[in-house]
Amino acid sequence: MDQRRSHIYGVVGEFEKPEVLVEAAKKAREAGYRRMDAYTPFPVEGLAEALGLKSSKVPLVTLAGGLIGGLGGFGFQYWASVISFPENIGGRSLNSWPAFIPVTFEMTVLGASLFAVFGMLAMNHLPQPHHPLFNVHRFQKHASSDRFFLCLQANDPKFSVSEAARFLQEIHAQHVNEVLDD
Amino acid sequence: MSDAKPPVNSLDSPGIQRLTPVLGPGHTYVSITDKISAIVLTRPTSIGWLAGFAVCFVIIMMLMVAIVYLIGKGVGIWGINIPIGWGFAIVNFVWWIGIGHAGTLISAILFLLNQKWRTSINRFAEAMTIFAVMCAGLFPLLHAGRPWYAYWMFPYPSVMNIWPQFRSPLIWDVFAVSTYFTVSLLFWFVGLIPDLATLRDRAVSKPLAIIYGMLALGWRGSARHWQRYQSAYLLLAGLATPLVLSVHTVVSFDFAIAIVPGWHTTIFPPYFVAGAIYSGFAMVITIAIPLRKAYGLEDFITMRHLENMAKVMLATGLIVAYGYFFEFFMAEYSGNKWDVFLVEQRLHGPYAHFYYALILCNILTPQLLWIQKIRTNVILLFLMSLVINTGMWLERFVIVVISLTRDFNPSAWGRYSATFWDYAVLIGTLGLFTGLLFLFVRVLPAISIAEMRELVTEVSEEHH
C-alpha cells in the first residue's frame, strides 16, 4: 500500500449537510472508489454503512479486557489468600469466594474500560499529531465545526487526481482540494 | 432521515416540553461551536470569575494549612476518639462520593436511555464527578494518619510478604473508588476528544493550539474513528452504569458488614445508592443554575433540564424516605432490643436535633417539588438544592455518629463533636471542589460541542 503513495494523499471535497455527505459517499462507492474516508464534526448516522466500513472491533477488545480484569482480579485474590499467604482464622475456608466478588467486579469493569478506551485509540492510530488533511486550510477551519468532508485517497487503484476532482464536483462538492502528503 | 419518531422524554410534562425545548431555537453548527468555544477561547476573564476563584483559592490555602497541621500533629486534632473513630472523615467521604454519582448517572444511564436532555449537562456533571471523587479520596487518605503509606492498601509485592485483606469492605472501597475515578476520568476524556479538536482548530494563539492539539490526540473526525469512538463510548456508558451502583453499594458495605446497631441492615445498599443520586442531582442543580446565568447558557441548559433534574430529585428523595421508613420499621418489627434502642436514640437522644433537621431537609422540603411552579422557579430550585445537599450530609452524620456513640454496651458510649480542624478540612474541600470547577469552565468546554451539533441536526429534523 505504501509504495503507491506519492506526494498526493488524495482529493477532498466539502459538503454542507450530513445527509448530502452520506449520499456522496454512497455515490463514490457506486462509482468504484474503495479507499476513501469521510470527516465530520460529529458522528453521522448511516455514514459507516455508506462508506462500507466493517463493524467495529471495539466490543471484542472490551470483552477481552473485562475477562482479563475479572479472571485476573479473582485469580489474584485466590492466589494471595489461599496459596501465597494462607491464614487460618478459626477454621474459615481460605477460598471465601463471595468476599472476593466486589474486587473481582471492580477489576472486570476497570479492565474492560481501559481496553475499550485504549483499544479504540490504538485501532484509530491515535495519538497521531499530524495528518496530510491538516494541510488543507478549509479542513482545518471547518472539519471540527460545521462542514462535512469526503476524501478520495490516492492509494485507491482507481484514483487519479483529475478524475477524482471531477467526480467530487459532479456530486456537488464545494471547495474541492488536493491533499498534499508531505 | 428516518421516519422513526424521536424518543419521547417521558420525564417531561407536556407543557414544559412544548414551551422549552432541550435547545433554544435558531441554533446552527457554527453558532453552537462559537458560543461554547468562545467561553474558553476568546471571552475575557471576568471580574466575577476572578473574584470567585480568589475566594476558592483562599479556602484551598486554608485546606493546605489544615492538612499540614494534621500531618504534623496527627489525627488527634480532629474530634475523633474511641468510640467515634471515624467522625467527619467518613461522613464527608460518603457525602462527596455520593455527589459524584449524579455525574455518572447523567452521562451513562441517561445516555443508554437515549434521553436527549442529558446532552448539555453531561460534561460539567462528569467534571463534577471527578472533582467530587478527588475531594472524597482526601478523607480516607488523611484519616489514615500517615497518608504517605496509603499505597499499603494496594496489593504490591513487598518485603513484608503479606497482602491486603481482600475480605474487608475497606479494601473493596479502595478498589471501588479507584476504579470509579479511573473510569470517570476515561469517560470524561473520551467525551472531550472531539471538542479538544475543535478548540485546537479555533485556538487564537499558537501555544493554545499546541496544548489543545496534544490533548486532542490528532482527532480529525474520520468516519472510521467515529465508528470505533461511538462503540467505545457506548460500552463505557454500559460499564459505568453498574459501576456507579456498585461504588455506593460498596461504600454502604463499610457500614452494613459491621454489626453495629443501625448499620447492619440489608436496606443500606439501595438506600445509599438512591441517596447518592439524590445529593448528586442537587449538586448538579447547584452548579448549573449559576453557570447558565454567568455565561448566558440559558439556550443550552433550559428550564426543561432543570425541571427534569428536579423530578429525578423528587423521585430519589422518595426512595430515600422509603429507606428511612424501613430502617425504623425493620427495627421495630424485628424487636431486636439494640435496634429498637437506636431508633429511640435517633428520635430522643442527644443528636435528635440532627435527625429532625435531616427529615426536614431530605423528606419534607423536597415535597414542594410536586408543584410545577416551584420546579420551574430557578431561585427556589437553587435553594432547594442547597437544602438537600445539607440534608444528605446530615444523613451520613446521623448514621455514623448516633450508631457509634450508642453501641451495645453503655460503658462504651460516648459523645462526638467536631473541632475547628474538622470544619477546616470540610470547608477546604468545598473550596477545592468549587475552585476546580472554576478552572474547568475556563479551560475546557463546559458543554459538549460535538453532541450539541448532533442535537441541532435532530432538532431541525423534528421541525420538518
Image (tube, coloured by chain):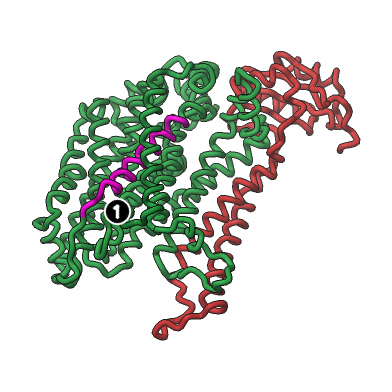
Q: Quadrant of residue A11?
A: top right
Q: Is residue B387 above or below residue B410?
A: above
Q: Which quadrant of the figure contains the N terminus of chain B?
A: top right
Residue at left 65%, top 18%? A141
Whether residue B427 appears in magenta in the rendering, the answer is yes
Q: Quadrant of residue B364?
A: top left
Task: Name the main secondary structure of what is drawn in magenta.
Answer: helix
Query: How many numbered circles are shown?
Result: 1
**Secondary element type, mark 1:** loop
Query: Which of the chains is green?
Result: B
Could you tell me residue A47's position as x and y percent? 64, 31
Could you tell me residue A172's position as x and y percent? 70, 15
Q: Nearer the viewer, residue B235 or B425?
A: B425
Residue at left 26%, top 52%? B396
Q: Which colour is chain A painted?
A: red
Could you tell me residue A29's position as x and y percent? 75, 30
Q: Which residue is mark 1?
A: B78
Which residue is situated farthest in the bottom direction here?
A91
Which residue is situated farthest in the front direction here?
B72
Q: Horizontally, is A170 left or right of B313 in the view?
A: right
Could you tell me residue B222's position as x and y percent? 67, 32
Q: Is residue B54 above or below residue B45?
A: below
Identified by mark 1, the residue type is Trp
For the record, the magenta segment spans: B417-440
